Image: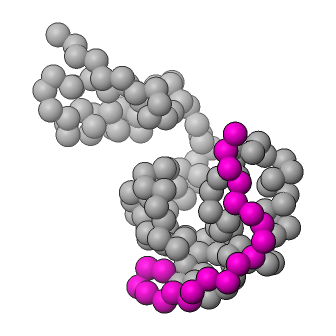
Amino acid sequence: MGKAYPLEPAEVRPVNTKYRRITTKIPVPESIPILEKLRQWEPRSMSGQPLVIWHKAKGVNVFDAYGNMWLDFSSGVLVTNAGHGNPKICRAIKEMVSRPLLHNYCFPSEIRANLVEKIAQLSPEPLKKVFLLTTGAETVILQVA
């Protein structure tokens, strides 16, 4: 079983740098009810993360609702490599949400055609075929003759 961090707030040394700001105890006392709810309804394996309640994010930083700022070390999980709140990505999401078609997964669409073309153009030989999947866990590189 994974080890869970204790829910007792501890004094920590204040930090104030370009990418980090810690001004409270950790975990923040006001966040304990949220952490307790998560522990009640999620498996223990989810309790191994630092006791920081993410509230918002921008660029490479995540913020709690209590004045602390953290460097997002999740690196690549969903949005971090592009930065949280990237204006270009936000515009694209808003454009897609405004259409009545929000999902088509494996069915043909012009958007999918444009995406696979772009990925293939950026890929070296012989990787000129693209198969889109939902996660990296499904990824396999096939060499097609």
In the current view of this chain or complex, which residue is farthest to the left?
125
In the current view of this chain or complex, which residue is farthest to the top?
145
> Residue at (43%, 51%) from the top-left corner?
76
What range of the chain is rendered magenta? Answer: 1-20
Q: Is residue 14 magenta?
A: yes
As drawn, 4 above or below 117: below
Residue 12 location, x and y as percent? 61, 83
Q: Is residue 133 magenta?
A: no
Specify whether 134 is left or right of 118: right
> Residue at (74%, 63%) from the top-left corner?
6
Q: Main secondary structure of the magenta part?
A: loop
Residue 78 location, x and y as percent? 49, 50
As drawn, 133 above or below 35: above
Q: Specify the quadrant that holds the C terminus.
A: top left
Residue 17 visible, this orientation: yes
Q: Specify the quadrant that holds the N terminus.
A: top right
As drawn, 110 above or below 57: above
Count of numbered tags: 0
- The chosen color scheme is one colour
Pick the front one: 28 or 54: 28
As drawn, 17 above or below 1: below
**Quadrant in the picture for residue 113:** top left
> Residue at (39%, 57%) from the top-left corner?
81
Specify whether 54 is left or right of 83: right
Residue 115 location, x and y as percent? 35, 38
Residue 92 visible, this orientation: no
**Quadrant in the picture for residue 4:** bottom right
Residue 36 location, x and y as percent? 84, 60
**Quadrant in the picture for residue 136:** top left
> Residue at (56%, 89%) from the top-left corner?
14
